[in-house]
Image: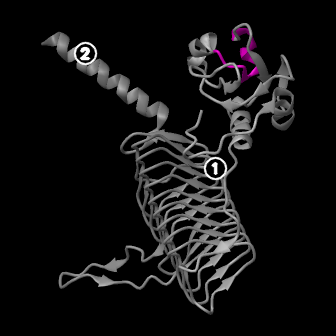
């Protein structure tokens, strides 16, 4: 059970209602009450869990959970006494149900007297603006936004409806689409790293673009997104970006992308729709990464990646090619040892 100091105690839900809300097929007692969600290995008989990865079938065989989301193909693995919720997407169903138990809290609409709001700023209806927040001139805050403590909304910044800005985040030279969330400490719209190299000293290139973030985007804690040098830096609809990511000026990221922690994307690179970049991937500038491409963690991308291709390694290459090279190196090492 979640720590009650940080999370509200959830209201109980019957399995019949859970099945209805999740679209799962119930095998078992629909009248049974579920009080919480929990992992397979710790769940109790009044708690709900899930099995999505076959490598956890041992935990599933021993679970004491009252109910479990599973794929229909895994039904034969179920221990006796566990009610089953059959669905082709167990983890998604679990996530949706966990949100019912623990809905994202939002305070009542209010503006703290300790916030600093410029008279020219436009504030929509039903907003929450917490103590220490700063909203500068000509900023536009749409209905239902939540600006947390000490966040800074710069001059002319525009927020769509239901945007949430985390504690100590700073926004400048940007527009944020509706229902997006910027997490704690993120920096959006600062100067890009643009300069002319000269032996007598570097010359700063004015960064005259913006950052345009579409709807339903998540930007993780302490992530930084530079504004464009002339063209805008853009993030497409539904893209989720993890913590500690650096996105350079003029970068274009499509819709539905996943970018994991500590990725660095150099300036003017174009990333297509539904691209996935694993943790600590480094991307050189002025590249094109095609729609649906996937890149494994800690890879270094130095050239364009075609649409739909999976790559890994440093420098990054198609996964099959990389694995062949690894196998070849192993054989070389083994042969050298046998010669010695």
The magenta stretch spans which residues? 64-77
Q: Position of residue 246 (x, y in %)?
A: 43, 61
Residue name at image x 51 percent, y 56 percent: 220
**Which disc, if any, is residue 242?**
none
Q: Is residue 328 left or right of residue 167?
A: left
Q: Is residue 322 visible?
A: yes
SS class, disc 1: loop
State the image quarter where residue 325 is shown: top left
Q: Is residue 48 left or right of residue 1?
A: right
Distance Cα–Cα, label 1 vs label 2 = 40 Å
Residue name at image x 66 percent, y 31 percent: 37
State the image quarter where residue 161 is shown: bottom right
Residue 304 position (above or below residue 339) = below
The C terminus lies in which quarter of the figure?
top left
Out of 100 and 79, give the one closest to the viewer: 100
Q: Position of residue 26 (x, y in %)?
A: 84, 22
Give the residue at mark 1.
274
The N terminus lies in which quarter of the figure?
top right
Give the residue at mark 2.
334
State the image quarter where residue 148 is shown: bottom right
Q: Position of residue 170 (x, y in %)?
A: 48, 72
* Residue 97 within the segment the image draws in magenta: no
């Amino acid at each position: 059970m979640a720590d009650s100091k940080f999370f509200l105690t959830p209201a109980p839900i019957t399995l019949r209602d859970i099945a209805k809300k999740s679209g799962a097929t119930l095998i078992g007692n629909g009248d049974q009450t579920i009080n919480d969600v929990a992992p397979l290995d710790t769940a109790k008989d009044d708690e709900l869990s899930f099995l999505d990865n076959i490598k956890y079938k041992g935990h599933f065989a021993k679970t004491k959970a009252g109910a479990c989301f599973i794929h229909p193909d895994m039904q034969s693995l179920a221990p006796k006494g566990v009610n089953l919720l059959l669905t082709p997407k167990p983890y998604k169903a679990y996530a949706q149900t966990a949100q019912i138990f623990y809905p994202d809290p939002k305070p009542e609409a209010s503006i703290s007297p300790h916030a600093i709001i410029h008279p020219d700023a436009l504030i929509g209806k039903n907003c929450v603006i917490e103590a220490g927040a700063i909203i500068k001139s000509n900023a536009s805050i749409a209905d239902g936004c939540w600006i947390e403590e000490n966040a800074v909304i710069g001059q002319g910044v525009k927020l769509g409806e239901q945007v949430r800005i985390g504690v100590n985040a700073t926004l400048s030279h940007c527009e944020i689409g509706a229902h997006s969330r910027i997490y704690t400490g993120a920096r959006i719209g600062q100067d890009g790293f643009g300069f002319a190299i000269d032996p007598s000293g570097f010359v700063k290139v004015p960064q005259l673009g913006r950052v345009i973030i579409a709807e339903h985007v998540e930007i993780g804690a302490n992530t930084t997104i530079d504004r464009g040098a002339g063209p805008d830096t853009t993030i497409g609809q539904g893209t989720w970006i993890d913590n500690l990511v650096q996105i350079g000026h003029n970068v274009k990221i499509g819709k539905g992308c996943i970018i994991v922690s500590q990725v660095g994307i150099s300036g003017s690179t174009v990333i297509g729709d539904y691209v996935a970049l694993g943790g600590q991937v480094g991307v050189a500038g002025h590249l094109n990464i095609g729609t649906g491409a996937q890149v494994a963690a800690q890879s270094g991308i130095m050239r364009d990646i075609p649409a739909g291709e999976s790559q890994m390694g440093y420098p990054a290459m198609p996964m099959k090619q990389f694995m062949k090279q690894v196998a070849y190196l192993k054989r070389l090492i083994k042969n050298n040892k046998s010669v010695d």
